[in-house]
Structure formats: C-alpha cells, structure tokens
Image: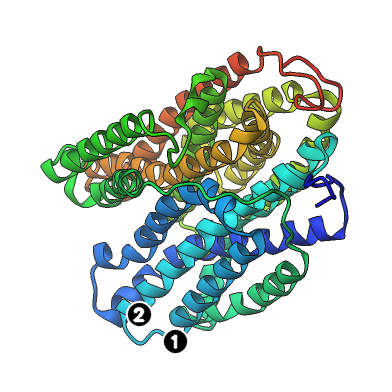
Amino acid sequence: MTDNGRFERRIDGKLFLSILATGLMSFTGIVIETAMNVTFPTLMREFSLNISAVQWVTTGYLLMLAVIIPLSAFLKARFVMKRLFFTASVLFVGGTLLGAFAGTFTVLLVGRLLQGIGTGIALPLMFNIILEQAPLNRMGMMMGVASLICALSPAVGPSFGGWVVETFGWRAIFFALLPVLGLSFCCGMYAVRQSSLLSRPAFDIPSYFLLGGSFAALIFAVSFAGDYGWGSLPIITLLGLFFILLACFARRSGRIEMPLIHLDIFADWHFSLSVLALFIIQFITLGLGFLLPNFSQLVHGETPFAAGCILLPGCLIGALLAPVSGRVLDAYGPRRPVIFGTVMIVLATVTFALSLQKSTTQSLTLIYIAYTIGQGFAAGNILTTGVRLLVPRRQSDGNAVCNTPQQLAGAVGTAVVSTVVVSGQQAHIDDLAAGTLAGSASALYVLSVLAVIACLAMGVTLRKKLTAGGESGGKGEAV
C-alpha cells in the first residue's frame, strides 16, 4: 500500500507467489474432487456402503464450495487477505489429514467438508488478488495463469486417482497432497499481501441461509436424480425449493442496504450473458469429463487408467494455452480469443456428436484436444471480460458470482449427462455397449446445442464497447 492508501499495481515475485499459493490449494481441491470419483468402488467395499452414501464425499465437498464461495466478497472486505489464506490452508490441511487417517466413513466425510471450505476460500481469493494487484494491461495474462492452474486439475484427477488407488490405496491420494499444500502454505505466508482497505460490512444471516439453502437443494437434487429420477417427487421438490429460496434471496437483497452480494450487477445484461457462457462451458467440460472415460471403457473396452488418460493431453495443451490467450486479450482485446475459443468449442462438440459411432479412443483424444484449445482461449477471457464490465467496487461481487455458478455447473453437468446416458442404457438393456453409445450420442447433441448458446451469448456480449483505460485490453478495442 502507498502512503495515500492505494495499492501500486505491479508484476513482481510476490504477486506470482501469491497466485501460486492460492492456485496450488485450488488445484489440489479440484484434483482430489475428480480423483475421489475413481475410489467409489473401493470405498463401498471398505466401509460397506452403497453408491448413494459414498457419493457424499463429492456431494458434501461441492456443497461446501457452493455455500462458501458466495461469501468471498464479504470475507475480502472484512478480513486481511493473509488471514483468509492462513484459515483456508489450516482447514484444507486438517481435512487432508483426516482423510488420510480416516478409520470410518464419517471421519472421511468431515475431512472432505473441511477441504471444501478451504477451497471455497482459496479459489475466489486467487482471482481477487489478480483483479486488485495485477497491472491492467497484463490482466488477461495473469487471469490466464490462474485459469491454467484450474484447467489442469480435472484432467490430472482421474488418471492420478486411478494410478494411486491401484498402486498404493485410496489413502495415498491424501498423503500425496501434503507436500503440495506445504509449498502452498510457505509461499502464501510470505507473499500474500493486502491491496485494499478493510471495512466492516454487515453480514445478513437470513440472506446467507436463503442462498446456502437454495444451493444445497440444487446440489442434493442433481446428486440423487440418478437414484430417484428427474421426474420423481423428491427431486421436483428439491428443484422447486431451489428456485423459491433463490427468489427469496434476490428479493431480500434488493430491499436491504448492505446485501451479501450486490445483485444490481445483473442489470448489465452483458455481464449476465458472460456468466451464462461460463456456466455452460463448465457444464460441458465436466459433462465430457464424465462421458468420455466411461464411453471408452464401456464401448471401446479400455482400462480405467487408459480411459482416464483420454482427457490428459487435451487439458495439458489447453491449460498451457490459457496464459497465451490472456496475452492475446491484453494486446488485442477479448473479441479475438473469446470468439475463436467459443467457435472451437462448438466445432469440437458437434464433431463428437457426429463421429461418435465410428470413433476410436485416439479420435476422441484428438477431438478433446480441439475442445480444450477452445476452452483455454474462452473460459479465462470470458471471466476477465465479464468482471471488468463492472465498476471496480463491484468486481469482488462479480468474481463471486462468476465462480459460484461454475461449481454448480460441474455438479449439474455431470448429473444431466449421466442421466441421459443411463436412459440410453435402459433402452438397450440387453446390450450395454449399444445403450451407452445411444445415450452418449444424445448427451453430446445436448452439449452441442449448449455450446452454440454460449457462443451466441458471447457474440452479443462482445458487441458492447468497454470503457477506455485498459478494461477492454491493451488497445482499448471495442468488444
């Protein structure tokens, strides 16, 4: 902070180490979320539980993310950044140790909940650090670096989890995270610094329970729709509760002086379209992450490890392109990288749908590389563009709004795709491979339509001319 209370935006070692520290914690959180999915059969045998009970190690984690991330704007305004980082680190390490030494499923679940709280604090903190501390003419590149950290996680998780479980047992997944978390803690405690003045915003408890309750209802609905069916009374009730509580939250937020999240940011419908596009891309990404490995195993006969590796080359390439795409945004504005990225996503999903019947594991891997190239150019730049459409005092609210739907989209995308695939399998009950093929094709047509919607949403958004001063990119291009 300078003498006049303003933070001097600059790229230095502490900024990189701050992003690295918060990014590593976010990375480990997402890695273990996807890695734990391959442990379900092992956990079911060890703890004598059914799949619905074991699924709580993922459902509970997602629930914590969904109820903590919306608090990020309040937490940033109320607490010093280093204290937030310390709290997130302690909770995540504590949860990891509980998971590593869990003798009962209850202890394992508590550990996963603590990890969810830690990730829920660290993930938006990483983006807030960039928004407040990075130079405006390098914002795209720095957001690309953050996107790289997050983009690698879903690809590493399944292959990493499958290899560790087969070789060392499921507890080794938790032990393997501890050195990474130690590095994250050391970097963060040295480098995380304060870049904004603190305030004492009011915390509206009724709003928080309305918002948390609505997200909890949605998470429960999509997590158990496979067991009860989307048209069943429990699932319809939960979905109805989600909409009712969310509407009550919005109504209350518009009536109180200091809401938990300033929903007036949605008055800029270009920002709203950016949030929609982010939600759809994450929906598609997690849907493909579920669909492709399972399709490869059930139709192509691949092993779990080989099927999980379908995602790895694409995610590595797409993630490495994220900082490059950010530099393109800094130099030319968001139109070029975002349009290129969303068009690539459309082409890849359509190609998946049209070529699925004659596909091979190799062809799926190649198409997924094309998809992740599009994701690498689109996702981080859409988030950057959307948040920078807002005035500075509302950008932390925008960050919370952009990150929360992405977490919900992962749960919804996986649930919807799995339901469509199961429907195909039930229609071909005597031939699992044929049923999986039919269900997967239907799911990919749904994802293709969503990809087109995301592309059109960003096409409309990028017609808006952003203000000068670096908000639209290095050359001040009209978007």
**Can residue 455 be seen in this snapshot?**
yes
Q: What residue type is labelled 1?
A: Phe
Q: In which quarter of the image is residue 380?
A: top right
Q: Which amino acid does label 2 sit on?
A: Val
Which quadrant, please, contains the C terminus? top right
- Residue 131 placement (x, y as % from top left): 70, 42
Residue at far front of view: 4
Tell me the residue that label 2 is attached to: 107
In the rendering, which numbered label is found on residue 101?
1
- Residue 346 placement (x, y as % from top left): 57, 26
Residues at badges 1 and 2 in contact (C-beta under 8 Å)? yes
Which structural element holds mark 2? helix
In terms of depth relative to the viewer, which is nearer, 334 or 89?
A: 89
In terms of depth relative to the viewer, which is nearer, 347 or 280?
A: 280
Q: Residue at x 27, y 64 (%)?
A: 51
Q: In this view, does 222 lie above or below 471?
A: below
Q: Residue at x 59, y 62 (%)?
A: 84
- Residue 211 placement (x, y as % from top left): 34, 44
Q: Distance between the residues labelled 1 and 2?
A: 9 Å
User: Taking 319 as reference, is 420 left or right?
Assistant: left
User: Taking 303 as reference, is 463 left or right?
Assistant: right
